Image (cartoon, rainbow, N blue to C red):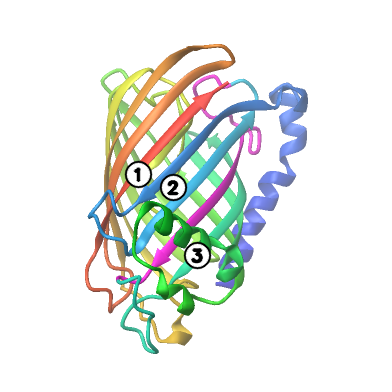
Amino acid sequence: MRVCVRAILGFAVILFGGAGPSLAENDGGWDDYVPLGVTFFTSNDFLGDRDDRWRTGGFSFSAAWGPEWRGKLPETPFALTEFRLRADTITPEDVTVPVPPGVSDRRYAGVLGAGAHTHFELGGWEVSAGVDMIWTGEQTNLGAIHNFLHDTLGGAELNTRASQIPDGFHPTAVLEVGRTFAFADGNARLRPFAEVQAGLETFARVGADFTLGPAGREALLVRDNGTGHRYTVVPGGSGVAFTVGGDIARVTESDLLPSNLGYRLTPTRQRARVGLIFQEDLPIPYFRDAALFLGWTWHSKEFETQREGQLTSSIGFTYSF
């Protein structure tokens, strides 16, 4: 894992370290570095298969900064930067019964992270590279927030918090490369991709996403870590679009399912997803465009003793300045 982390971090340093002069020469300098759009994206299994288990909840906030958005990625690394905050709660299948010693089910985990990701185009390839600082365990206080929401809105007592994974700090690097093939005047788009990550979970992943409709055609789309959905951060292309996608990953190491506690990872991890994008101009001062996303994701088992896969739902809201 350390070799992978160093390789991806080194790649990010090269990108970020060389961005300054190019940005000044090609994109108008740092004076033109302005806020472009923000997104709130959340996922939950209760509105998926109506259970409260495993990857039970997630929240991401993304904000993009860069030169004026022209409907396509810049050719300069770090000319456009997405700053991302994320919080995830992961539980056993039954949140009311503390997990006993052994590997019958996964332990409760709170995951809190902050990071920066650059998105650019290189020879027709769409590249996303970034680093996230991630904390896990009781120090995140996500278990307490989760329990408060259950007490307030109605839900089972989270007794599994007592056996959650230990506090930890996990610098995580990720790199994704994809290419979009457009058909029917750009209203139908197929995008295969490959992704590698090292840190909190270390994996290599391949997959594809297909989009039908004008919405998102000229938008900045980024991938959610948990569901795999590509959600809008900077809108572009009004109307409605339908998306369908899937991927398969080989996970070699997971600090959420540590081998020293006896967990055996599944040989592969699959996801299948569908979604709808609604995008329109906003007749509101200081706001330009808005986008709404609705989606569902099927997740395969992540560890050998997990009883079955699960279905999660996602909602995202985006607006640009």
Location of residue 156 by image quarter: bottom left
Q: Are marks 1 and 2 in contact (CB under 8 Å)?
A: yes
Q: Position of residue 285 (x, y in %)?
A: 57, 11
Q: Is residue 10 left or right of residue 93?
A: right
Residue 284 is covered by the magenta coloring: no
Q: Mark 3 or mark 2, which has the lower sequence index?
A: 3
What residue does disc 3 label? 143
Q: Is residue 321 left or right of residue 249?
A: right
Judging depth in this view, the residue of 216 and 261 nearest the camera is 261
What residue does disc 1 label? 314
What residue does disc 2 label? 224
Name the front one of labels 1 and 2.
1
- Write the start and end of the magenta stretch as one range: 69-93
Q: Secondary structure at mark 3?
A: helix
Q: Quadrant of the C terminus?
A: top right
Quick one: label 2, few (<14), some, or many (20+) residues within 10 Å?
Answer: some
Can residue 170 be seen here? The reply is no
Residue 71 is covered by the magenta coloring: yes
Judging depth in this view, the residue of 248 and 124 nearest the camera is 248
The kind of residue tagged 2 is Asp
Quick one: label 3, few (<14), some, or many (20+) residues within 10 Å?
Answer: many
Name the front one of labels 3 and 1.
3
Q: Is residue 209 above or below residue 91?
A: above
Q: Mark 3 or mark 1, which has the lower sequence index?
A: 3
